[in-house]
Image (cartoon, coloured by chain):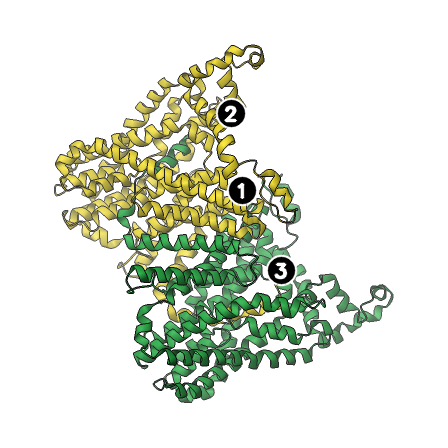
Chain colours: A yellow, B green
Amino acid sequence: MTMVETIEVLSPVLQGSSSSFLSTGTIIALTGFFALLCACIIIGHLLEENLWANESIISLVLGLCSGLVVLLVTKFENSHILTFSEDLFFLYLLPPIIFNAGFQVKKKQFFKNFTTIFLFGVFGTMISFCIISLGAYFLFKRVGVTNLNIQDYLAIGAILSATDSVCTLQVLSQDETPLLYSIVFALKLFGTFLYLFFTSTALGIAAGLISAFIIKTLYFGRHSTDREVALMMLMAYLSYMLAELFNLSGILTIFFCGIVMSHYTWHNVTESSRITTKHAFATISFIAETFIFLYVGMDALDIEKWKESKGSAGTSLAVSSTLLALVLVGRAAFVFPIANITNLMKKRENTKIEFRQQFIIWWAGLMRGAVTIALSYNQFANSDDTSTQDSALMITCTMIVVLFSTLVFGSITKPLIGAVLLRHAKPTISDATDIPSQEDLNILFLESGDPSEQTNNPLTRKSSLRLLITNPTYTVHFWWRKFDDKCMRPVFGGRGFVPFVPGSPTGARDETS
Amino acid sequence: MTMVETIEVLSPVLQGSSSSFLSTGTIIALTGFFALLCACIIIGHLLEENLWANESIISLVLGLCSGLVVLLVTKFENSHILTFSEDLFFLYLLPPIIFNAGFQVKKKQFFKNFTTIFLFGVFGTMISFCIISLGAYFLFKRVGVTNLNIQDYLAIGAILSATDSVCTLQVLSQDETPLLYSIVFALKLFGTFLYLFFTSTALGIAAGLISAFIIKTLYFGRHSTDREVALMMLMAYLSYMLAELFNLSGILTIFFCGIVMSHYTWHNVTESSRITTKHAFATISFIAETFIFLYVGMDALDIEKWKESKGSAGTSLAVSSTLLALVLVGRAAFVFPIANITNLMKKRENTKIEFRQQFIIWWAGLMRGAVTIALSYNQFANSDDTSTQDSALMITCTMIVVLFSTLVFGSITKPLIGAVLLRHAKPTISDATDIPSQEDLNILFLESGDPSEQTNNPLTRKSSLRLLITNPTYTVHFWWRKFDDKCMRPVFGGRGFVPFVPGSPTGARDETS
């Protein structure tokens, strides 16, 4: 920095306070919130080795505590520091979390298990949705909740079904004839889902590839690594906003954008940009997650909603436990059947999902979080059809389900996984899928797995077609690799691409690209 | 990532669109804005070697162009994609820019030039403020602007004076007796300034030291580097919010927080956190800056304001050029005198500010930006005392000054610096202050600068007191070093502190701390 620049720094530095522009309320709220976020991080670190605690529980408890403090300070008038805003949640908190999930996912493993994941996602959601909706419809009458209409029950199913399916809810709210609609629901939902899935994925992949192409072609690293990082962030966010603009699934788009970026773009940038993006994305996602749980914790003490719901503690408890039981049954009803069906399709013993693992998959998906609460607000907070009392009851019961599942199920998860999985020395599925890629290629060419046959017996090559039928994932992976190396990487970069290193002669780059 | 986690990822992934929650307007605005930000980065990179263009000019021109497009699309009803929000500006865009300035500033150079910087900041602002206020008062009448009161003239001076002094404005708006007040203004402002300066600085330093202490004591790197990065970001932002809460200067606080964090905290974190923070902070600051200029460009075409101002193009031009001339004169009136006064106090020839450098300091500080526009809006947009017409005229003229200074002065700066400074082979002040610290110590102990004398002649040590009087900066720096090494670094870490490296035995850390 030259002297001129140093003096330039002074200009804004020697400003006075700008607080005349900001309302004191906003400042107090933000100060409190950021102090709580810092506290969450520090406490989370201190309790890192505690078996029962995890980051989300700590944030939730801290949120509850500070909500209580706000309640006491405002004499039971308010528990919020900030009001729950769906915009804040869907525009600023969710995208970085999902993008980071895509960016850090172990791609090979994700795509190897893609069939299972897809089956769980599509059919699992539907089964869970039907069970929760029907269960609520038949059981709620017994505890005295009678004013809900069919659309409300379908909404409850959608809100609490495994995938927090925003999609389901949206399709629902577009329809005006709920009774007829619920019959043809499944088919139409499936069509909508497939359309959304493919268009959203395509958009995400396109955004990722464009970012890879731009960074590879222009090699930003020559001038500044900051531009590379900024462009990756902005392109990812842009893909999310574009998807929302076209009424696609922004979450699906940004997830696949993250995957493509980690496969191509990330390898095209300089070494320091790689480290920066990897940790910066994880950090932003981490802050957003903590923020959400803190928020939910505070929101749980919204005294207005509790007053409005009017129902006795007994009714609330009955409805909440019904919902919780339905969530448990709904998830069990698809995890175990689908896992066993996919097991039947698998030839290799060590890729099958054992019962122990099925149990963990069932358990780990029971937690409900901020998406559930956001959806519940969206459906019931401004509902015209449903009575205020029942709407408020639904919101408070959703809150109880979220709190209970996060606090109780969440704290048991770590010890449970330890007890169920780790006690057995046999490699679990997570280890089994980490086998290096050399083995994949062996399997593709050699049925017996003996390398010596490869050169001696040309007939083994012919078996690849048979393998494609018996073991499709590996073959698809192999052909993808070939396609990736021949067509994609020369254009979009990716692993093995050496980005321009500042300081080295310009010619060095041309050899590698 | 285990299979369980992979399937967990799927939950939010298989959601549908969430756009039912967001207004289409917001989505279109954000999509447009992020697309423009990407375009700015790419064009900025392509024009990197262009002598006349720089990032702010490109953003401003792109903002103007897209404002024009919006104007045409909405048939001259609107030029905004987003409305100008002081909250957005002061809460989210300004803090990261200032923090990064503090974090990346070359500390040694900054503190060596601190006297000059302080003098420029305090007296410079006052001189400039008086000249612009008085000039506007006497000159505006000649171009037909007669309805402004004294408070407005003082505001114009404050808005356009060198440091964009928000402080000045705030003190002004608190007072109800403008005429009397303008007489005692300077003294009171100085008192307020000193109070704000020391409390704000203390708060920033405290926040920085606390973050250093927490990270050093708890050594987060053991578990995750993300927590380190998150804590640094949150603590910095928290210091800004706390300062605003106590009516201090948030900008000053976060600037010094950045300096302390780069001196202590940054050395306490793991290597990957260091790379991440360095680049992530720079990237966020870069995006915020581009965002602001884009915003100002669009805001400049606010057709409503132009209609309201009603004054002929001639009046606008006359007022704008008067203001521009006053800015030029106001800055010249303190840069050259103060630079020459500080030159008189300096003994060493190569630390003196040459006339060429004075010229560049004068020139580089002429650009006015988003802070000026934000202040102008704050003063004139909701003013009750001033007529709507004159208020609108003031806002549009401020806009013209900002656009002209950024576009014209900004584009000339790079060639001008090249022509004035680089043509001379003699080292400039920016090089002179980059001499390694070994020389500082030599200067402290040896008046002649001959290293051989150091060991032979014990009398030279006695001269340190004399040096403290004749050359205070170096001596202060030496004692600060001693204090830092003996008292501060053992507690707060800093350079030379080896953070815990995951994977190495736990004992390794205890030796270094």
Distance Cα–Cα, label 2 vs label 3:
50 Å
Residue corresponding to mark 1: A268
> Which residue type carries mark 3?
Met
Residue A318, compared with residue B323, is above or below; it is above
- Chain bearing tag 1 is A
Chain under disc 3: B
Does residue A494 appear left or right of residue B298 in this picture? right
Q: Chain of mark 2?
A: A
Residue A441 at what x, y percent from top left?
51, 21
- Could you tell me residue B228's position as x and y percent? 52, 49
Q: Label 2: which residue?
A: A435
> Which kind of residue does numbered mark 2 sit on?
Ile
Foreground of the two, B11 or A356: B11
Q: What is the spatial separation of the Cα atoms under label 1 and label 3, in whole angstroms?
A: 42 Å
Judge from the rendering whether residue B414 lies leftward or rightward of residue A114; answer left or right.
right
| x then y, percent, for residue A492 | 50, 39
Say which residue label 3 marks: B488
Q: Nearer the viewer, mark 2 or mark 3?
A: 2
Q: Disc 1 marks which amino acid?
A: Asn
Secondary element at image label 2? loop
- Circles 1 and 3: CB distance less than 8 Å? no
